[in-house]
Amino acid sequence: LKYVPLPGGEAAIKRPYRMAVSHLLSAFGEEALDLPLELWAQIGEAELALVRRMMAAKVNCPLTSSCGRLFDAVSALLGVRGVVNYEGQAAIELEMLAAEGVDEVYDWSRASSYPIIIDPAPVLRGVVSDLRRGVDRAVISAKFHNTIADTIVGVSRAARERTGINQVALSGGVFQNMYLLGRTLDGLERQGFEALIHHQVPANDGGIALGQAVIANARLSRRKER
């Protein structure tokens, strides 16, 4: 995904509304602040001003391309979860909200050259447009999930055309989302891909932690052998 600021670093993970601000400003520029969104009232003027100052000064604002943070942003934007009590809460509640039987998607764009970079701005604009038109939040959530899944399939097709590789490994915390995983697997299967998914090792940071432990153990074993 295209990089966007992570206002306050780790604080933005605990406060998904900060990612909503970041993505909205990236998608609309300063005009985002004129949009009639409930989000602004929920954040409050003081907090919004703080986030804007951090982004403008590029202070404590590392860049992120995390898909999980995009889910957080949409969750906060829809008023589902602006502050989390545990890891992944905003995305989990967004998934639970998604309506069944929705096949619509939002527009999405990607760079025509390599490396493939997805700009989520069109998706954010679509979500805001639906909110302003009064579309049910459950439908918006489903459309968002559908868009991410279809984007993954589209990028996989582009990569296959360039490399000839027909295997796609689906890993990362977002693939604990069963709606997203199911839609993505269906799309990949229709396009003739072989999809690789987790069965014994967690798809999220738990898998990374296990890998780190394996590497650490291997290094310790080598030292003992010496």
Image: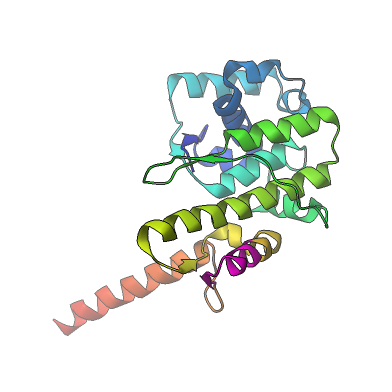
Q: Is residue 82 visible?
A: no
Name the residue at 59% across, 57% down: 174
Instruction: Give how far across and how far down residue 17 sits, in percent.
Output: 66, 34
Q: Nearer the viewer, residue 144 or 173?
A: 144
Q: Please determine whether, in this image, residue 32 is positioned above or below residue 122.
A: above
Magenta span contains residue 189: yes
Name the residue at 65% across, 48% down: 147
The answer to whether 66 appears left or right of 222 in the picture is right
Magenta span contains residue 172: no
Q: How many marks?
A: 0
Residue 132 occupies quadrant: top right
Q: Please determine whether, in this image, residue 212 is positioned above or below residue 224.
A: above
Q: Nearer the viewer, residue 183 or 220?
A: 183
Residues rendered magenta in the picture? 184-197
The answer to whether 109 appears left or right of 94 in the picture is left
Q: Quadrant of the C terminus?
A: bottom left
Direction bottom: furthest residue: 225
Coloring basis for residues? rainbow
Name the residue at 51% across, 61% down: 205
Q: Is residue 171 visible?
A: yes
Instruction: Give how far across and how far down residue 223 sits, in percent.
Output: 19, 77
